[in-house]
Each structure stands twice: as C-alpha cells, then as structure tokens.
Amino acid sequence: MTVTEDAEFCARDLIGSAGIGGNGEKLVNTLQDYYPPELQVAQLKRVNPELSAELDDGDVLAQVARIAGVERIAHAVVAGGIDPGDEAVVRYAVINADGTVSKGFFPYTDLESGSSDRHVSQRASLAQGVVASEVRQSREYAGVAPGETVAAAPEQPLADPYEALEGLSAADTVKLMEANPERAEAIKAFEEASRGDRARKSVLEWEPPEGDSDSGD
C-alpha cells in the first residue's frame, strides 16, 4: 500500500507498526469527526419505505451521487418524515477507493434542487478534522511531493477508527478511556450503537476517578 501527499486522509493512516496503542489518542480524537452528531441523529431515523421507493429510479440515485460529490452510491434510503415534525433525510453509503465504507445524509427536500447546504458526510468531516490536518502536515514535513509515493507500514491490514474500536477487548477499551477520559462518552455511545444488547457492562459503567474528569490540566 502507498500513500501520497494529496491522497484523501483515511483513519487507517493513524495505525502503523505501533498498532492502535501507538496512536490511541489521535484515534479517539477522530471519533467526533468521523461520526458527527448530525449524522448520528440521521442514522437513528426510521426508514421511510414510501419515499425510499423513489430511489429505485436511476436518475434519482444519480442525483443523490451528485449531491454527495461521488460518482456512484452503494446504497441509499430515505429515513424520517413519518411522524409529524420529523424531517425526512436521504441517507447514503459509498465505497471508498480503499474498500472502506463512508456514510452521509442530506435533507430529502434538497433532492430535487441538486445541491444541499446541509449535506453531512463522513468523508468531508474526517478530511477537515484536526487529526487529518496533522497527518497532512507530517507528510509535507517528510518532503513527499505531490504524486510521489512513500511506503506505508506493511505489518497488518489497517482499519477505520470504528472498526479499530470494535476490535478492542473490553479491558483495552477501558484503558483507552482511562487515557482519554474526555472521549469516554463518545466511546460508550459507540459501544451501545455497535453492540446493542451485547454492549459490555465494564465499558458502559466506567467513570473517570474523581477529580480526573478535566483532562485539560
């Protein structure tokens, strides 16, 4: 695998030969960028079968792709708009060049206009995050010219931050929260969302020691 200076930032850039522990803090800091609150809310909306049927039309699906800023959409549904006051949104998933999946959404009412000021995507959110900026700066510092490739760590397949967290044991997840108490709630939220009834009690019930909740000191 190779990376370039102008390549799209991927969270797998954070995990090299040092493994998850070597970049644990940065990995956790990508959580809010990778899965912004607006997207979390959109993911909880119920699928609207009637409106989703419109996406069976190839032209409509192409419109979704244009708003998403990609060539092709892997999957899309309309969610919400069922209960009064519940805004309908178009949720979609795309497959990135590296094989990972990214999600996004925009208001259903923007579908006809072909653009959306409220479009939220994991690709854009992650690329604009602080950690992505640090990775780009490190590439520049290393003197990687546009288009020039540098070898990436070959030791093991790398994963996005959520896949990496999902693979951690309960004990290691607790250690990650101990090292990054300011991100504990985000980690717990992911634990509940990804495991449901199988969410691990030791993770959900962990609390920082009294007086250690402020990590800014």
Image (tube, rainbow, N blue to C red):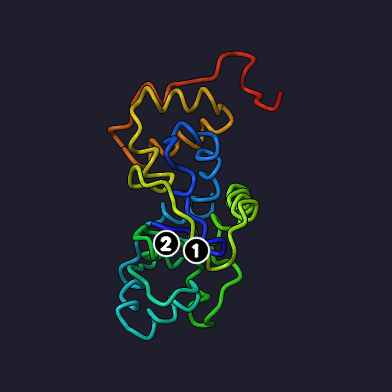
Amino acid type of the residue that numbered disc 2 sits on in the rendered structure: Gly
Q: Report which residue position mark 2 lands on.
A: 80
Residue 101 relative to residue 179: left or right:
left
Q: Is residue 107 left or right of residue 100?
A: right
Which quadrant of the figure contains the C terminus? top right
Which percent across, then down, holds residue 209?
Answer: 56, 14
Q: Measuring 50% from the left and 74% from the top, which residue is drawn there? A: 69
Which residue is pictured at 35% across the width and 25% down the height? Answer: 170
User: Split into 4 quadrants, where in the image is the N terminus?
Assistant: bottom left
Residue 199 vertical placement versus 43 (above, below): above
Indicate the position of residue 23 as horizontal and vertical percent values.
51, 36
Q: Are marks 2 and 1 in contact (CB under 8 Å)?
A: yes
Q: Can residue 137 be seen?
A: yes
Query: Disc 2 on helix, strand or loop?
Result: loop
**Badge 1 density bin: few <14, some 14–19, many ≥20, Cα 10 Å:** some
Residue highlighted by disc 1: 87
Please state which of residues 5 and 47 is positioned toward the viewer in this rendering: 5
Compared to 44, does 58 lie above or below? below
Q: Amino acid at mark 1?
A: Glu
Q: Position of residue 32 (x, y in %)?
A: 54, 45
Residue 106 in the image, given as x and y percentages of width and height? 50, 67
The answer, for residue 93, to whether it is visible in the render is: no
Helix, strand or loop status at disc 1: loop
